[in-house]
């Protein structure tokens, strides 16, 4: 029983407890994931537009983007952005007379990394969803005299989202788990905070179990947001 | 701008990590596959006491980051050294190689069991009924009818799993294993040439993934000769 009270003490919210730090780190994880996912949505939509374009160069560029960032380990992409960016920044710094290594801001780098990786996955989701929209809808837009932008905004995208939501839910889960990798560049999100706690108390088991539980709770709660949106997107529609 | 001599220099260095990447991928896929098969078959019955813990296992391993799982097994269980030594499995958790394989295998078991569960469900009912009608035992039906069809059905999903596994092995570098990504990280911090190292290491991973996809597509085509391909 002393072990249990010890756990309660370590993870508690009183003076010397790690509860508040872990919760704060969870909010960093959540913010990092949400911003990365939103950036990924913009990149993914651009990539999908490229893939669907009849012009060769955008189609090819989007294809390469998707293949590379879905095929290369995410950790490698994170190293590329962090070290690549920091090296460039250090060189610029030397021009202005600073000496020594200039590190990139870790939160921004994390958002960028997650955005680029999840954009590659989201691109595929949007492309598939666009192709799932009934051809008749495009013809109806033309018949009504809607411009290309109007038909996308008013007719195609709202319907496309119905097909995209399950895929986006999967990408979101991926993003949430990928955010743990940002700990390698030193950002104090949930994973890194657990490592710090584990190192300082010499109780790694408790801290990693706590981190796993918090990730799990975030995953389960946010999954219900996607389920709710999906139900809403399909309201009034009959589907199998 | 692009320094070809530098590429020629680092490619063999990075390729030295390929055997470890392949070893981790293969070992974890094979162990994970058999565990997944076991979990999928165990869920075929209706016993809640069997199904419930399996569902929980799958949900936990799919819902938490692989990095947390690796740290939990490598650093977390290391804390219980005396107990692990007492039951004689300390050797498993002492070595980062084994810890990585244990974490990756359990992760794969969780994802794979869902794929196999779906694939078993997709075997037409009429076939198993026909097998029962012709007097085949449950085990024989499983071996001759259900598993061959289910496994063939699962090939495309398993191709994705193997690619994810190849990428997943990169996390082993965080617990000191020098596979391709670990070597790449070392090279970047020594040479300060992140882009070149990324391109070289990325090319190795892409080539590996391409080879895996081609091989499994060929296998699928061979196993479904009747299917007309577009």
Image (cartoon, coloured by chain):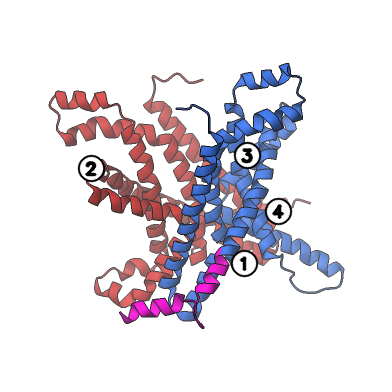
Chain letter of disc 2 in the image: B
What secondary structure do most residues of the magenta stretch adopt? helix
Residue on which disc 4 sits: B5
Say which chain is blue: A
Residue on which disc 3 sits: A123
Determine contact: label 2, label 3, CB under 8 Å: no
Determine contact: label 1, label 4, CB under 8 Å: no
Determine contact: label 2, label 1, CB under 8 Å: no
In 3D space, how far apart are the residues under numbered discs 1 and 4 (Cα atoms)?
35 Å
Residue on which disc 1 sits: A187
- Mark 2 lies on a secondary structure that is loop
Say which chain is red: B
* Residue B16 in sight in this render: no
Provide residue B26's location: percent of width, then percent of height.
40, 49
- Mark 1 lies on a secondary structure that is loop
The part of the chain drawn in magenta is A1-26
Determine contact: label 2, label 4, CB under 8 Å: no
Provide residue A204's location: percent of width, then percent of height.
44, 73
In 3D space, how far apart are the residues under numbered discs 4 and 3 (Cα atoms)?
35 Å
Label 1: few (<14), some (14–19) or many (≥20) C-alpha neighbours in 10 Å: many
Residue on which disc 2 sits: B46
């Amino acid at each position: 029983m002393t072990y249990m009270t010890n756990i309660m003490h370590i993870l508690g919210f009183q003076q010397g407890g790690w509860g508040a730090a872990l919760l704060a780190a969870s909010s960093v994880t959540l913010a990092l994931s949400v911003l990365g996912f939103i950036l990924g949505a913009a990149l993914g939509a651009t990539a999908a537009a490229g893939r669907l374009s009849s012009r060769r160069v955008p189609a090819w560029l989007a294809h390469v983007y998707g293949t590379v960032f879905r095929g290369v380990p995410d950790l490698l992409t994170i190293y590329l952005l962090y070290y690549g960016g920091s090296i460039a920044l250090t060189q610029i710094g030397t021009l202005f007379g600073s000496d020594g290594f200039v590190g990139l801001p870790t939160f921004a780098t994390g958002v960028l990394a997650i955005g680029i990786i999840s954009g590659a996955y989201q691109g595929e989701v949007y492309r598939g969803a666009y192709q799932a929209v009934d051809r008749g809808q495009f013809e109806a837009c033309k018949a009504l005299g809607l411009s290309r932008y109007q038909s996308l905004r008013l007719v195609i995208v709202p319907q496309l989202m119905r097909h995209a939501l399950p895929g986006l839910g999967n990408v979101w889960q991926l993003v949430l788990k990928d955010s743990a990798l940002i700990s390698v560049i030193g950002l104090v999100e949930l994973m890194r905070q657990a490592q710090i706690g584990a190192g300082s108390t010499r109780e790694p088991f408790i801290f990693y179990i706590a981190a796993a539980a918090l990730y799990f709770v975030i995953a389960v709660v946010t999954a219900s947001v996607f389920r709710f949106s999906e139900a809403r997107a399909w309201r009034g529609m009959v589907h199998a | 701008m692009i320094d070809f001599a530098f590429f020629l220099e680092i490619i063999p260095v990075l390729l030295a990590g390929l055997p470890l990447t392949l070893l981790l991928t293969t070992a974890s896929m094979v162990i994970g596959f058999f565990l997944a098969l076991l979990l999928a078959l165990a869920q075929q019955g209706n016993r809640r006491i069997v199904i419930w813990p399996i569902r929980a296992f799958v949900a936990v391993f799919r819902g938490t980051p692989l990095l947390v799982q690796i740290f939990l097994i490598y650093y977390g269980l290391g804390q219980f050294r005396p107990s692990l030594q007492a039951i004689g499995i300390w050797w498993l958790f002492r070595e980062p190689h084994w810890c990585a394989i244990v974490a990756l295998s359990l992760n794969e078991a969780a994802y794979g069991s869902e794929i196999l569960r779906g694939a078993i469900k997709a075997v037409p009912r009429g076939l198993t009924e026909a097998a029962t009608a012709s007097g085949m035992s449950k085990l024989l039906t499983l071996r001759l009818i259900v598993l061959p069809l289910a496994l063939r059905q699962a090939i495309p999903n398993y191709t994705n799993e193997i690619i994810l596994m190849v990428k997943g092995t990169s996390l082993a570098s965080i617990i000191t294993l020098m596979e391709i990504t670990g070597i790449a990280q070392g090279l970047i911090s020594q040479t300060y040439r992140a882009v070149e190292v990324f391109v070289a290491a990325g090319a190795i991973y892409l080539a590996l993934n391409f080879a895996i996809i081609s091989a499994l597509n060929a296998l699928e085509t061979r196993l479904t000769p009747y299917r007309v391909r577009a």
